[in-house]
Image (spheres, rainbow, N blue to C red):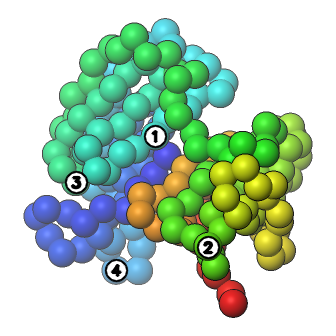
Amino acid sequence: DFALVTRLSSSEPALVVLDKNQLAVYEPFGAELHLSHASAIPQSAALVSRDLSAQIDLKSASFRIANLECTGDPDLTGTVHCRNTKTPESRLVRAKPADFSNGVSAALSGSCAGESTSLVSGSGDWTQTDSIQGYLAAGSSAVATSSGAPLSFPGPVISLYPEPDTTSARAIVHNLKTGDYEAYIVTATCNH
């Protein structure tokens, strides 16, 4: 996962990147981002999963990875402290619209003309390129309908988390050509 934070020590934003070994903080230096520092994440047997889910929660200055719950400074840019929990990795909550069982999805805050908005990835496996499609649904029992054109990505979308109180979601994509993981912020806009 990743998050953009405002540093407590400066007015400049920082990029916080969570992977299975560390929480890394990148700060702007000219036109580029440079690693400012990293906090190691204690290793656990649960961290060997191929489908390792993790999520940063800026509101509580914490993050979850497998069976670890970690907290830190309010901007998560200092030292972090982790503890084992009994909550297994599979209990990490991903918001899912009721109509979709395949892929990953995020139910977004707000609405478009009174309809709820969601972003949903494709349903292929992790060896294929992927896309994210916007959906609208009127009411809690209504069937969601696609809205707009899907966004294509160079590999599978492996996580999609809604940004709190916005119409955006954080997406992590495994680029099949480079082997790298890429981070995106995808925003749903409402056209009337």
Q: Specify which label sits upstream in the sequence, 1 or 4.
A: 4
Residue 58 relative to residue 8: left or right: right
Which element carries disc 2, helix, strand or loop?
Answer: loop
Label 1–label 3 contact, CB within 8 A? no
The residue wearing badge 1 is: 55
Q: Nearer the viewer, mark 2 or mark 3?
A: 2
Tell me, yes or no, whether the two marked residues, 2 and 1, touch with CB atoms within 8 Å: no
Residue drawn 65% across the image and 44% down it: 96
Place of residue 43 in the rendered image (x, y in percent of width and height, measured from the top left): 40, 17
Residue type (three-letter) at the residue carrying disc 4: Gly
The Cα–Cα distance between marks 1 and 3, rounded to whole angstroms, is 15 Å
Which amino acid does the dot numbered 1 rest on?
Answer: Gln
Cα separation, mark 2 vs mark 1, equals 29 Å
Q: Are marks 4 and 2 in contact (CB under 8 Å)?
A: no
Q: Which of the two discs, 1 and 3, labels the residue nearer the N terminus?
A: 1
Nearer to us of marks 4 and 2 is 2
Q: Residue 114 bears which disc, if any?
A: 2
The residue carrying mark 3 is 75
* Coordinates of residue 80 in the picture (x, y in percent): 22, 35
Task: Inspect the image, locate mark 3, and give the three-letter code of the amino acid beneath it.
Answer: Asp
Tell me where residue 120 appears, x and y as whole percent.
73, 54
Image quadrant assignment for residue 3: bottom left
Q: Quadrant of residue 13?
A: bottom left
Give the mark, 2 or 3, whose residue is nearer the N terminus: 3
Decide if residue 31 is on the left or right side of residue 60: right
Q: Amino acid at mark 2?
A: Gly
CB atoms of marks 1 and 4 within 8 Å: no
Q: In the image, what residue occupies the spot 16% across and 45% down?
A: 73
Inter-mark Cα distance, 4 to 3: 22 Å
Q: Nearer the viewer, mark 4 or mark 3?
A: 3
Give the residue drawn at x 35%, y 14%.
Answer: 85
Secondary structure at badge 3 equals: loop
